Amino acid sequence: MRENFFAYISRMRYIGRWSLMRNSLPENIQEHSHMVAVLAHALGVIRRDVFGVPCSPEEAAAVALFHDSSEILTGDLPTPIKYHSDDIREAYKQVEALACHKLLETLPAELRPAYEPLLTGEVQDRVHDLVKAADKLSAYIKCIEERKAGNNEFLSAEAQTRKILEDCHMPEVDYFLEHFIPSFELNLDELGTIE
């Protein structure tokens, strides 16, 4: 098999998100994965440095970078469909797992052990809650940005996502919501310049 892994990964930029919504600011899974990695790293740092719980923010960031890589092969299934029923959710998990294994097969054998835990393994399991929370935070930030751009299409998604974040009862998420989310409401002039 050809060693196409990184060529596939680079194609993440062609997979759009929020396909059922009218977007003022289009987003692809490459952009989304970068933001999720930034947020997962932040949540890991908060877990470790604010709450004193052992954690590797670097692992969380690495898993987040690849968390949607299966969508290179599957596309982005809209959330209302993906979570419509337990049967669909389970079937899609199987499709995602198959896609991740197919991607791993496009790596040389000597590199697979380094990437397999990020896509399917123990490292992924250790930081799953952080990456899932970061994924929701990224969606919430997207909703805020769309609302600020005058797009009311995302108002319901914003309220629903905020509730999910508040209901997850993760101290790292609560800390991020309190300390960092308010800044996303500001424009560049309000953020100020770096002195």
Image: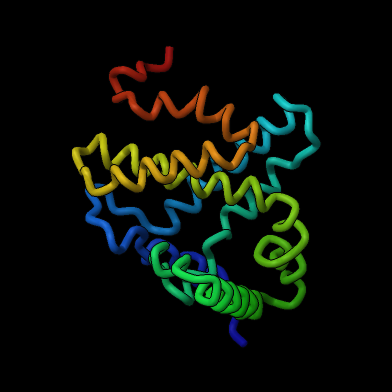
Residue 4 visible to the viewer: no
Q: Position of residue 135 (x, y in %)?
A: 52, 49
How many dots with numbers? 0
Could you tell me which residue is drawn at 74 percent across and 77 percent down?
Answer: 109
The quadrant the N terminus occupies is bottom right
Colour mode?
rainbow
Q: Position of residue 101 (x, y in %)?
A: 64, 77
In terms of depth relative to the viewer, which is nearer, 50 or 6?
Answer: 50
Could you tell me which residue is drawn at 56 percent across and 47 percent down?
Answer: 37
Q: Position of residue 4 (x, y in %)?
A: 55, 77
Q: Is residue 169 above or below residue 193?
A: below
Could you tell me which residue is drawn at 59 percent across and 52 percent down?
Answer: 64
Q: Is residue 186 above or below residue 121?
A: above
Task: Classify residue 160 by image quadrant.
Answer: top left
Could you tell me which residue is drawn at 64 percent across and 37 percent down?
Answer: 170
The quadrant the C terminus occupies is top left
Q: Position of residue 106 (x, y in %)?
A: 61, 78
Residue 157 visible to the viewer: yes
Q: Residue furthest left?
A: 150
